[in-house]
Amino acid sequence: MKILVSVSNKYVHLLAPYSILFNKYWPDQEVIFLGFDNPDVPELPDNFSYVSLGKQSDFGSHWTNPILPYINSLKDDYFVITAEDVVLCGPVDIEKANMLEDEVKLGNADKAMLDSHLNWNLQFGGEMHPYKNGVLKLSQFAQYRTSLAPAIWRKDYFLRYCKPNMSQWDFEIENMPESQRDKATIISLDDKEFLFKSANVYRQGVPAPWPDQRLTWGSTSGICKEDILLIYKYLPEAHQQANKDYLENLKDGVLYH
């Protein structure tokens, strides 16, 4: 199963720590960075590749325009898609990942969420229904059915919503009304612990931690000192210096959320 990772030139410095952490927690996967022309792309592990979709300046804020030709060219019936600033920070349960993949592969599900953030999010209509043992189905009327949180998508279902001239925000929000009547099957694990345990490195261009947020790394599962220090090793010097005291006071054996 291909893992497609959308990359902005602004965050190309994250490719090295992203690949290291991905192979630490979900090894032996085929990961493809979908980025743009950039001389600063680092050397990547053998299971990673980098595809340039052209010049980023040609597309402005339209995320779907460069993505569409690539997705259309894929022979695969399904894939995972996620973003470069959503880094893995915990082990993936391979057996459970394979179970979700099989449901999409067999055409039983159109999308399988790799986290469970909509399962209990009742304020967004996140009512779940029994699907199979250990798996739930998202309500047809739930909001954010087209969320770009890490998920396995059937190619045809993704293309239904990957319309020209959309930003990532447009993809999630403007597609919401249609997705609430599309009769698609969207599943996730019946588990409060995410399968794809991740942390957000950036929020609006500012690197974690964000002391004003309940989750200062945007992570329900938490990220350890070792992984934080790895990420910061690749961040711009100004960001390292601005968070010097924080980094020096990190503790072993603690998960930072």
Image: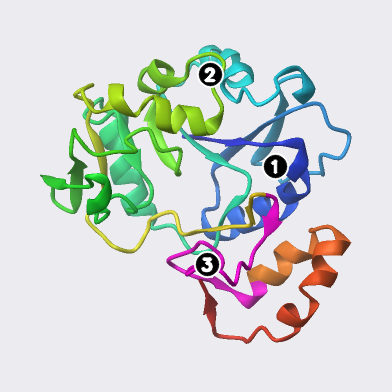
Horizontally, is 45 left or right of 220 in the view? right
Label the magenta part by its dominant secondary structure.
loop
Q: Which residue is mark 1?
A: 46
Q: Which residue is mark 2?
A: 71
| Residue span colored magenta | 205-226
Q: With respect to residue 168, does 245 lie above or below?
A: below
Q: Residue 248: horizontal and vertical position, in percent?
A: 75, 84
Amino acid bearing label 2:
Ile
User: Which residue is depicted at the point 55% across and 47% down?
Assistant: 28
Graded by Cα atoms within 10 Å as few (under 14), some (14 to 19) or many (20 or more), the crowding at tag 3 reads: few
* Camera sees residue 87: yes
Question: Whole-Å distance between the Cαs marked 3 and 1?
Answer: 37 Å
Question: What's under tag 3, amino acid-wise?
Answer: Gln
Compare marks 3 and 1 and give the one earlier in the sequence: 1
| 176 on left or right of 3 | left
Instruction: Decide which of 131, 138 is in the foreground and name it.
Output: 138
Residue at 18% across / 54% down in the picture? 134
Residue 202 sits inside the magenta stretch: no
Depicted 70 relative to depicted 90: above or below: above
Q: Amino acid at mark 1?
A: Asp
- Name the residue tied to disc 3: 213
Task: Say if mark 2 contacts mark 3, CB within 8 Å.
Answer: no
Q: Nearer the viewer, mark 2 or mark 3?
A: 3
Q: Earlier in the sequence, mark 2 or mark 1?
A: 1
- The mark closer to the camera, 2 or 1, is 2
Element class at badge 3: loop
Find residue 20 and report its horizontal and vertical position in percent.
67, 56
Residue sitting at x 63%, y 44%: 84
- Of residues 251 and 74, the one nearer the viewer is 251
